[in-house]
Image (spheres, rainbow, N blue to C red):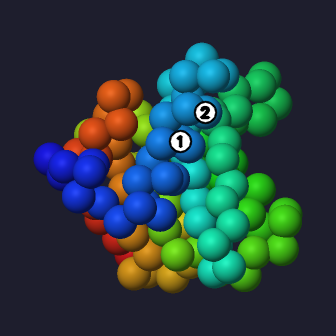
Amino acid sequence: MTDSSALDPEDRKIVTLARSARARNGVPEGAAVRDETGRTYVAGTVALDSLKLSALQTAVAMAVASGATSLEAAAVVTEAETASAEDRAAVRDLGGAQTPVLVAGPDGTVTTTLTAG
């Protein structure tokens, strides 16, 4: 478990944004990514009959749609113990294998930090 107060302020910000998206939208997961310019993209789980995306996949898609060319970091707030292989692949596709992925519980405490690779 990682002390969230020990996180870099920019990493703490994306965890807070992800947590807020989850709570605000009442979805299973919230996520946020930070691009190469420092812009952030926040999303929740998308669960339509015709479209299903995790929160992290949606946040990456929003970054791409907004013109981001790389990612500095990603965060997901979830009850799962880790980020799925599909989520890490989406982050890796835009940010590269070494992009950090912060996984936090619903209370915002970071439980795991891994790379997209």
Q: Residue sitting at 26 percent across and 51 percent down?
A: 5
C-alpha gap between disc 1 and disc 2:
5 Å
Taking depth in this image into account, of 15 and 70 the one nearest to the observer is 15
> Is residue 54 among what the camera can see?
no
Q: With respect to residue 100, does 49 lie above or below?
A: above
The label shown at residue 52 is none
Please say if the residues under marks 1 and 2 sit with CB atoms less than 8 Å apart.
yes
Q: With respect to residue 35, does 113 lie above or below?
A: above
Q: With respect to residue 21, does 57 lie above or below?
A: below
Q: With respect to residue 22, does 55 lie above or below?
A: below
Image x and y of residue 70, in percent: 64, 80
Image x and y of residue 83, in percent: 39, 50
Tell me the element at label 2. helix
Taking depth in this image into account, of 31 and 3 the one nearest to the observer is 3
Image x and y of residue 74, in percent: 49, 60
> Is residue 63 among what the camera can see?
yes
Image x and y of residue 8, in percent: 35, 66
Q: Residue sitting at 41 percent across and 61 percent down?
A: 9
Q: Residue sitting at 77 percent across and 56 percent down?
A: 62
Three-letter amino acid code at the position of disc 1: Ala
Would you say 71 lies left or right of 87 here?
right
Three-letter amino acid code at the position of disc 2: Ala
Q: Which quadrant holds residue 65?
A: bottom right
Q: Which quadrant holds residue 54?
A: top right
The label shown at residue 21 is 2
